[in-house]
Image (spheres, helix red, strand yellow):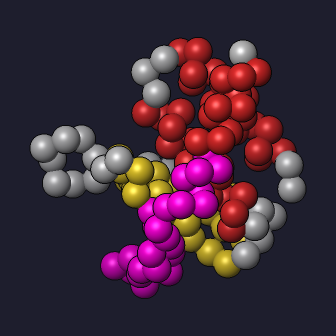
Amino acid sequence: MSSNVIHLYQNISNFVRSSEWLRDITQKGKRFISSTYKHHKIRIYGEELSHSFQLALKKRGIQRYDFREIIDAKGKNTLAVKELAYTALRGTLSESEDEKQLLRNLYRELKSNT
């Protein structure tokens, strides 16, 4: 089990370190950075220590994204929010109940650390 957690955390670290994060503005003028995992998007809003994030899921063959609720991540730096958002996305996409549980635990741990 611990080797699975280490493997998941290495995936999170690799994604955060190697993914491209682009700056953009919503239709309502809200600034964010975003990155893509597979064909899904992660959006991070706000300034340092005052962030929130949102997942945008996309089904294959459909052009529209399903934007999920905005999740508050105040008190976290940008790197920590990237880790939280990616962990949440992986947990949402996972089909394995064991992996989902590991990701939930990892998410709670990341959320509680400052």
Question: If the image is split into quadrants, where does the N terminus sit?
Answer: top right
In the displayed structure, does residue 95 sit left or right of residue 65?
right
**Residue 58 location (% of width, % of height):** 28, 47
Which residue occupies the foreground of this view, 27 or 7? 7
Instruction: Tell which residue pokes out farthest to the right in this image.
Output: 114
The verdict on residue 84 being magenta is no
Residue ID at (75%, 67%): 77
Residue ID at (21%, 54%): 64
**Residue 85 location (% of width, % of height):** 58, 51
Which residue occupies the foreground of this view, 84 or 71? 84
Question: If the image is split into quadrants, where does the C terminus sit?
Answer: bottom right
**Residue 46 location (% of width, % of height):** 62, 75
For the question of whether residue 104 can be seen, the reply is no
Residue 47 in which image quadrant: bottom right
For the question of whether residue 79 can be seen, the reply is yes
Residue ID at (63%, 34%): 8
Region rendered in magenta: 12-35
Instruction: Tell which residue pokes out farthest to the bottom in this image.
Output: 29
Compared to residue 3, the image places residue 91 above or below, namely below
